[in-house]
Amino acid sequence: MSSTASRTSSGIETIPVFTGSNWQGWANKVQAYAQLMGVWDDIMENVVPLLPLPVADSTASPPVAGPSWSEQMAYQKAIKETRRSSEQAMGLISTKVSDSIRTRIYSEASTLL
């Protein structure tokens, strides 16, 4: 089993499903698990947004060079990692809430997109 697979299976079973009345215990366990998984910043929205790469502009004074190939690849990798982390955070939350609460979360999330 990979380290990621073992991390995702160990501990999540201890988190109860949030029903609306068990907030404190649920929140503490979700926070601990999310920190273990490295997605707590995504849940708390403390992720620094990735700024777009500069575009080459030979007419600027001084001319602006575009990003190198390695900078472009690093940027793409960072975007993928940010998406993956956000998806893990949303997956954690959505698997540990009741159906009615999950529906409300997805409804609210869709208005933000």
Image (tube, helix red, strand yellow):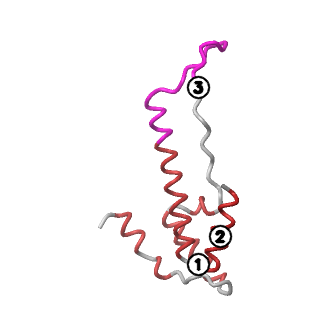
What type is the residue that disc 2 sits on?
Ile
Which residue is the site of mark 2? 105
Q: Is residue 101 above or below residue 40?
A: below
Q: Which residue is mark 3?
A: 55
Query: What residue is rendered at 57% in x and 71% in y?
Result: 93
User: Does residue 104 appear to the left or right of 34 in the view shown?
Assistant: right
- Residue 24, given in percent of the width and then of the height, sits at 66, 82
Q: Residue at x 69, y 57 (%)?
A: 112
* In this view, 31 is above or below 54: below
Which residues are drawn in magenta? 56-76
Q: Amino acid at mark 1?
A: Val
Q: Nearer the viewer, residue 37 or 53?
A: 53
Quarter of the picture containing the N terminus is bottom left
Q: Main secondary structure of the magenta part?
A: loop
Q: Is residue 111 above or below residue 97?
A: above
92 versus 63 height, above or below = below
Most foreground residue, 3 or 20: 20
Query: Quick one: SS at disc 1?
Result: loop
Q: Taking 83 as reference, is 1 left or right?
A: left
Label 2 residue SS: helix
- Nearest to the observer: residue 43 or residue 38: 43
* First in residue order: circle 3 vs circle 2: 3
Q: Earlier in the sequence, mark 1 or mark 2?
A: 1
Sequence-first disc among 1 and 3: 3
Give residue 110's position: percent from left, percent from top. Answer: 65, 61
Based on the picture, tell me whether residue 48 belongs to the magenta stretch: no
